[in-house]
Image: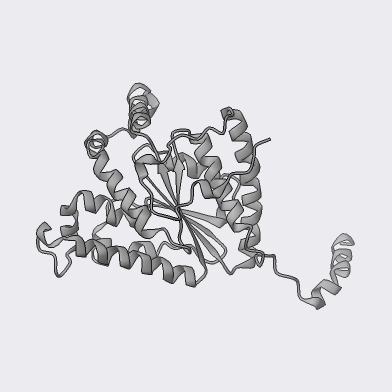
């Protein structure tokens, strides 16, 4: 039997050096055991989500970030497999549309937030706005900001303001009942290379490959520096980051599911609502009416 996941091993609660964090966790067991442990955990998560839906006071926002091939899509598929379809909504944020660029950069994330009683999963998140745009500052010019006319206007003060805006965004939604979980899938460069090669070698995986993946891979260190800054500047009590070793997909999925289940189970006020006393008193009568039809 698997030992419970120790959340503190992954939660970012103090300043970290991302390069010193491990990218592989195997729990000294095999993939079959990990997959069985995930099945048990996600069943419990599914039951908890049903209760949350009936309770109707909290929503859960799950944010997933990671390098290309880190396993975000398959993690979503496997962790939330036992959820009622009405209880979870997944948003994959791509390059902003023309409509989205006519609003502030957080607008498309605001309108995608989960309703009370539901889980929302952001596959890539609002943190792309201090990640991709930081590695490629020329992208900021497409946002039509009043005070940005060239990349020379994008200085440290600009990024400081953007981090403050993101932290305030999360603080606001947390104070209004959204429980925030942010997972960084920490993949090694060697494992990414192997996964990209698999996309090229396996015909059924070819569609996932883009030449741009190799261009972005050359910027690995820049991305890693930005991720480290994100973890250190935006892991808060109401919106903590978890750095999840991602070289083993089964282990990463099990850790994420375990974090969600353990943390959400602490909310002892999440209960199914009680029936009206008058209805409760007549349950036998209602059952008898149905049985005698």
Horizontal relation, residue 236 to residue 177: left or right: left
Q: Residue at x 17, y 66 (%)?
A: 145
Along the line of sight, which residue is nearer the eye, 100 or 123?
A: 123
Horizontal relation, residue 220 to residue 280: left or right: left
Q: Position of residue 186 (x, y in %)?
A: 40, 41
Instruction: Answer whether residue 78 is visible to the viewer in this image.
Output: no
How many numbered badges does the structure rendering display?
Answer: 0
Q: Residue at x 62, y 62 (%)?
A: 52
Q: Position of residue 63 (x, y in %)?
A: 43, 53
In which quadrant of the rendered view does residue 20 lie?
Answer: top left
**Quarter of the image with the C terminus in it:** bottom right
Q: Looking at this view, name the residue that lies furthest to the top.
A: 201
Q: Position of residue 123 (x, y in %)?
A: 40, 49
Along the line of sight, which residue is nearer the eye, 129 or 82?
A: 129
Its colouring scheme is: one colour
User: Is residue 107 positioned above or below 18 on the image?
Assistant: below
In which quadrant of the rendered view does residue 185 lie?
Answer: top left
Along the line of sight, which residue is nearer the eye, 56 or 61?
A: 61
Q: Position of residue 271 (x, y in %)?
A: 68, 65
Q: Looking at this view, name the residue that lies furthest to the bottom.
A: 278
Q: Which residue is drawn at 24% across and 61% down?
A: 159
Q: Residue at x 37, y 65 (%)?
A: 167
In which quadrant of the rendered view does residue 56 lie?
Answer: bottom right
**Quarter of the image with the N terminus in it:** top right
Instruction: Answer whether residue 41 is visible to the viewer in this image.
Output: yes
């Amino acid at each position: 039997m698997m030992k419970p996941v120790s959340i503190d091993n992954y939660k970012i609660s103090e300043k970290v050096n991302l390069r010193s964090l491990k990218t592989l966790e195997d729990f000294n067991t095999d993939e079959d055991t990990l997959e069985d442990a995930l099945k048990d955990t996600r069943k419990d998560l599914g039951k908890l989500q049903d209760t949350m839906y009936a309770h109707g006071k909290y929503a859960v926002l799950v944010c997933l970030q990671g390098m290309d091939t880190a396993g975000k899509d398959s993690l979503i598929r496997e962790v939330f497999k036992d959820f009622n379809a009405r209880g979870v909504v997944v948003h994959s944020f791509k390059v902003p549309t023309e409509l989205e660029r006519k609003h502030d950069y957080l607008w498309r994330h605001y309108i995608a937030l989960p309703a009370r009683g539901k889980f929302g999963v952001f596959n890539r998140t609002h943190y792309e706005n201090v990640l991709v745009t930081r590695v490629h500052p020329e992208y900021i010019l497409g946002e039509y900001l009043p005070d940005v006319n060239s990349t020379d206007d994008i200085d440290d003060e600009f990024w400081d303001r953007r981090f403050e805006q993101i932290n305030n965004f999360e603080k606001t939604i947390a104070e209004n009942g959204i429980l925030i979980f942010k997972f960084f899938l920490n993949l090694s460069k060697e494992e990414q290379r192997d996964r990209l090669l698999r996309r090229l070698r396996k015909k059924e995986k070819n569609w996932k490959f883009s030449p741009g993946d190799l261009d972005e891979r050359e910027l690995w260190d820049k991305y890693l520096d930005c991720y480290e800054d994100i973890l250190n500047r935006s892991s808060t009590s109401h919106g903590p980051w978890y750095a999840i070793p991602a070289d083993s997909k089964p282990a990463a999925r099990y850790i994420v599911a375990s974090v969600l289940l353990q943390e959400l189970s602490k909310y002892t006020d999440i209960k199914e609502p009680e029936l009206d006393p008058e209805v409760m008193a007549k349950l036998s009568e209602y059952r008898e009416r149905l049985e005698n039809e």
